[in-house]
Amino acid sequence: MSDHAQEESEGSPLTRRRLLWLAGGLGALVAAGATGVELVAHGVLPGQQYLDQIDGACSVAAPTLDLAPVGPSESGHFYSRARGRRVGYTLAYPPGHAPGDELPLVVMLHGYGDNHTNALVGLTPAQALALRVEGRALAPMALVTVDGGDGYWNPHPGDDPLAMVVDELIPWCQRRALGAPRAIGLMGISMGAYGALALAERHRDLVAAVAAISPAVWTSYAQARAANAGAFASATAFAAGDVITHASALARTALRVAVGRDDPFYPGVEELTRVLPARAVIVRESGCHSDPFFFAQEPPSLAFLAEHLA
């Protein structure tokens, strides 16, 4: 993986979609966000998602953001052998830190239809690290996002995004003094939250903490295939990546799972929470599978990771 990167300005942190959503008043489609739109378009989410947006069932109060001056970040591309293509990434440092500093690492996995540029809702990676949550700055940590495609972070012929994260991205970060063993956290939204859980289960000695926001969890291969035929390459792949079946692998991992009560994935998440370790933090609040809920859950999720990686 090349160390050459292009510096990214933090002066205009939000994508156009995020800016429009945060401005408010733009109707159901914008409120649902790109992830929700993509999932409905592919049958993963029912059309009821849009009706819920219209009648206010998905309303979530936006958190008040308190940010310190942001630290540096860089964006670039590298060729991934595991994915068989060039992928983009963004690596951010917390306030008061710079490349070369030894820090814990958070790998943020994006949702369906997104990429490394908009893995977070309403925040850039550098802004996320500059948050003050309940008046307190986050413990210093670095955060990296990367392009994982739309294959649910599962291996497909010629494309293995989790292998890219484990065998290419994380070692590259570790060569930069980021994320020593057991100093790595995972965070994800929707498809990315599923991917974070799946990665932690398969690499339990690598990951110390996971914050999963609205994980897109199915309870059977038939259910997954009916909703999104591209999520798993086969029934065997589903069995290998079934985060409910393999939840016992998370016994030593600090876990925070947040889900909206009107999220179509709520039943699957409930099945998951029944088999998670007793010390896992489970957050069930009003909300749907949409940007307002994702955005509201980002600050506490980041605070959870910072606490367990410090």
Image (cartoon, rainbow, N blue to C red):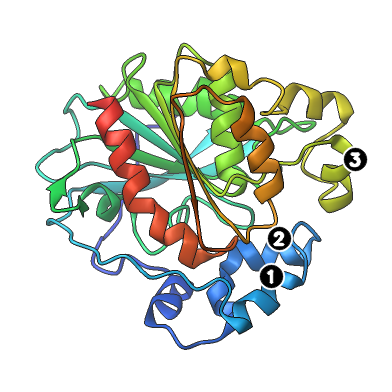
Would you place residue 185 above or below residue 259 in this image?
above
Q: CA distance from mark 2 to mark 1?
A: 10 Å
Q: Residue furthest left?
A: 96
Mark 3 highlights which residue? 222
What residue is rendered at 58% in x and 51% in y?
111
Q: Residues within 10 Å of mark 1 (few under 14, many from 20)?
A: many
Mark closest to the chain's N terminus, 3 or 2? 2
Q: Residues within 10 Å of mark 2 (few under 14, many from 20)?
A: many
Regarding residue 83, the answer to whether it shows in the image is no
**Badges 1 and 3: C-beta atoms under 8 Å apart?**
no
Q: Split into 4 quadrants, where in the image is the C terminus? A: top left
Q: Is residue 139 left or right of residue 41?
A: left
What residue is rendered at 32% in x and 21% in y?
183
Would you place residue 36 above or below residue 120 in this image?
below
Regarding residue 266, the answer to whether it shows in the image is yes
Amino acid type, mark 3: Ala
Query: Where's residue 220, x and y in %?
Result: 83, 36
Q: Split into 4 quadrants, where in the image is the N terminus? A: top left
Q: Is residue 44 left or right of residue 114?
A: right
What residue is rendered at 53% in x and 23% in y?
200
Mark closest to the chain's N terminus, 2 or 1? 2
Query: Where's residue 7, x and y in %?
Result: 28, 51
Front residue of this view, candidates 268 and 306: 268
Mark 2 highlights which residue? 39
Secondary structure of the residue carrying tag 3 is helix
Mark 1 highlights which residue? 49
Query: Where's residue 287, x and y in %?
Result: 53, 63
Amino acid type, mark 1: Gln
**Badges 2 and 1: C-beta atoms under 8 Å apart?**
yes
